[in-house]
Image: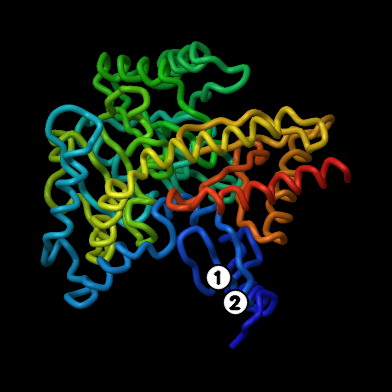
Amino acid sequence: MSTTNKDLLARRNNAVPRGVSTSTPVFADRAENAELWDVEGRRYVDFAGGIAVLNVGHRHPKVMAAVAKQLERFTHTAFQVSAYESYIELAEKLNARAPFSGPAKTIFFTTGGEATENAVKIARAATGRNGVIAFCGGFHGRTLLASAMTGKVLPYKAPFGTLPGEVYHVPFPDHDITVEDSLKMLHFLFAADIAPSNVAAIIIEPVQGEGGFRVAPTALLKHLRTLCDQHGIKLIADEVQSGFGRTGKLFGIEHSGVEPDLISVAKSLAGGMPLSGVIGRADLMDSVPPGGLGGTYAGAPLACAAALAVLDVIDEEKLLDRANAMGERLKARITAWHKRTDMLPISMPRGLGAMIAFDVLERHAGVEQRAGFASKLCAKACEKGLILLACGVQGATIRILTPLTASDALLDEGLDIIEQILIEEAKA
């Protein structure tokens, strides 16, 4: 069998379709907390966290122990056939921490796309309506309805023909687009394309993930809540990337004080095990009759056991406080870079908690060039031992998703690599 990255890349290209991309030419052999070693034994600092999945780090001992204990009992029964206590216990814990008043219920799935789609299914069942409103730049998954809700054509929509209908988009506040502009466009939508009485749900990320870590303004979220209450529309907070401590609160929308009706969750919920879910107001969740929701692997026993451990780790290790402290450290360092003239120009940092990003602002460069600089920065980071990801509507954003369990020393090591590249690129 192959033991080099180059050999494995050749095998990958022959065996796996190009539709699933891989950001780095690194093939993982093992990982621990915020470090990863490839098949050639080289060590990397992990600033990607499996795309926001590893808030508690790779192979957290408590998560590993919970999975091992469950492995000794059973791996699968299908919750629809023979239920199990861990699913119920996890639902109870999430219901108790749901960021809205009144009783809540939770159902589990496997992927983030399943979570967002099922949130819409529940909203449609509860309202008897079909319309869904989402935001430009938002990312809600790669299945057909999730792709339709995603506010970016390339690469998520273009090749796939007609997507599910009655999904509409309005601009997300950013740069020259104000909250007032977004709301004006929403009212234009109501006047021109779909009456609010036909809208089942408005879905929004409290902090856009793939869209570039753009924070939804509190004023926008409050206006959306008022509109939803006025017209009987359900407000869905997509917390797939922003949830479970990344923003310094368990759920990103808690920063606004706005209560959603439904929350889609996934990624860091289960510390690397595949698990997603929808948390919602109990009356909404019960609007779907038996058999209308679920999935063969949905809420798998190993994943539920891992998620229970993740919630314990977040509390016991005070990871919400850690996210805020880490975010301050990141913002201070990036702000200092922004002010320097000997480095590739970058924007000020943005985000909440440890969900922090900055834009590459190469002078006199067009959108495609700036996206190229961001990709080049990530590639050079990998060469120097740092796993780093780009994102953003224009692809020019560098995002940092370090496990919240990473030490300050490891965080600084990764930041030093980024700084070195920004200096080198400015000279080049």
Q: Dot 2 surroundings within 10 Å: few (below 14), some, or many (20 or more)?
A: some
Q: Residue at x 33, y 51 (%)?
A: 269
Labels 2 and 1 touching (C-beta < 8 A) = yes
Q: Eyeballing the image, is 407 above or below 239?
A: below
In the rendered image of this protein, does residue 151 appear above or below residue 112? above
Left or right position of 386 against 344: left
The CA distance from mark 2 to mark 1 is: 6 Å
Say few, some or many: other residues with alpha carbon within 10 Å of mark 1 (under 14 / 14 to 19 / 20 or more): some
Residue 39, labelled with which disc? 2
Of 341 and 80, the residue lying toward us: 341
Residue 162 lies, in percent from the top left, at: 50, 44
Q: In which quadrant is the N terminus drawn?
A: bottom right
In the image, what residue occupies the spot 53% across and 62% down?
35
Point out which mark residue 28 bears: 1
- Please give left or right for residue 121 compared with residue 182 in the image: left
Report the front residue among 1 and 145.
Answer: 1
- SS at circle 1: strand
Q: Earlier in the sequence, mark 2 or mark 1?
A: 1
How many numbered circles does the render carry? 2
